[in-house]
Each structure stands twice: as structure tokens, then as C-alpha cells.
Amino acid sequence: MKCMKLAGVIILIAIAAIMASACGGGGSASTNPQPTAVASSNISKPNPAVLLVNATTAGIEDNYYAILNITAKNEGADGVVIVVGSITQAGLTQTNEIPVYLASGSSQTVKLVFPLKWKGGDWTPSVQTEIP
């Protein structure tokens, strides 16, 4: 009977020792990594540029459209850029945008379509890129 109690006490001590070491008790060194601040100038971002804008029209009368085929290139880090196009006709401006994922050094052509009412005269396209 004494041997059983002694064995039980030894087992309890062993379990307590294992649980104490598993909880990380007693160590002075921290195992949690500390966050580090990174200056915003050191963060890599996409650096998009518009290479080409091909502006055309299609349709007649009420089904008249201005179509912009836009080629954008990314000279920065991989990421999403927003291609923003606008058409100005008779003093009114319409804007349309499309998000595009561009890998570093790659280019992609996207199409933006603008419904127009024929008002005579010229229309003027404008394209830019933004980083969200």
C-alpha cells in the first residue's frame, strides 16, 4: 500500500514537472517575436505607368461607344493597380475604372467602354493609374 502511494506521488510530481515546462514557466527569454516598425519609404509598392492608349469608337446614333484599349506596365513590386479612364465630350466627363493585378515588370492591356450620345464634335480621352 505504501508503495502504491509513493508511486502515485512520484507520478503526480512527474506530471506537474512536465506541465510546468510545457507552459514555458521559469524562462527569462521571450519566445514571442516583437513587431518591428518599417518606414513607409521601405515598403515595396507597385509603380504602374500607362504605356499606350488606343481610343476608338463603335456604333451609331443611340448605340455609340468610345472604347479605350489601355496598356499599363508595372515597374514596381507585384500588386493591384487601378486603371482609371475618362472621356470628355461637350464639357461632360464620364469616368470608368478597373482593378488589375500586375506582376513586377509585366504589362497588360485592358478595355474600358463608355456609352456616348452623339453630340457632334470631338471627345477627349484621359487615362491614369492609381495604387489602392
Image (spheres, grey):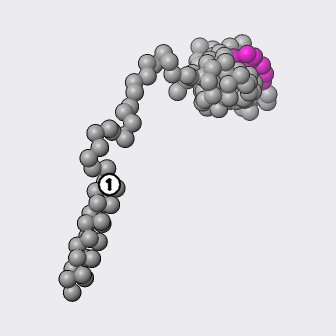
Q: Residue at x 26, y 71 (%)?
A: 10
The quarter holding residue 4 reads bottom left
Q: Between residue 105 and residue 18, name the one nearer to us.
A: 18
Q: Which residue is mark 1?
A: 21
Residue in front for this viewpoint, 2 or 74? 2
Q: Nearer the viewer, residue 90 or 39?
A: 39
Residue type marked 1: Ser
Residue 132: percent from the left, percent from the top? 52, 27
User: Along the horizontal axis of the image, is 83 left or right of 33?
Assistant: right
- Please give left or right for residue 125 compared with residue 3 in the image: right
Magenta run includes residue 103: no
x then y, percent, for residue 46: 60, 22
Farthest residue, direction front: 3
The answer to whether one can see residue 70 in this image is no
x, y percent for residue 43 = 51, 22
Count of marks overlaid on the render: 1
Q: Residue at x 29, y 43 (%)?
A: 27
Above-or-below relation of 114 to 54? below
Q: Which secondary structure, mark 1?
A: helix
- The magenta stretch is 50-57
Where is residue 20 shown, x and y percent of the image?
28, 56
Q: Residues within 10 Å of mark 1 (few under 14, many from 20)?
A: few
The secondary structure that dominates the magenta segment is strand
- The answer to which of 46 and 86 lies nearer the viewer is 46
Work out which quarter of the rendered image holds the N terminus and state it: bottom left
Q: Residue 54 magenta-drawn?
A: yes
Q: Residue at x 74, y 33 (%)?
A: 63
Going 34% across and 56% down the picture, which residue do you hit? 22
Judge left or right: residue 25 versus residue 59. left
The answer to whether one can see residue 54 in this image is yes
Q: What is the quadrant of residue 7 in the picture?
A: bottom left
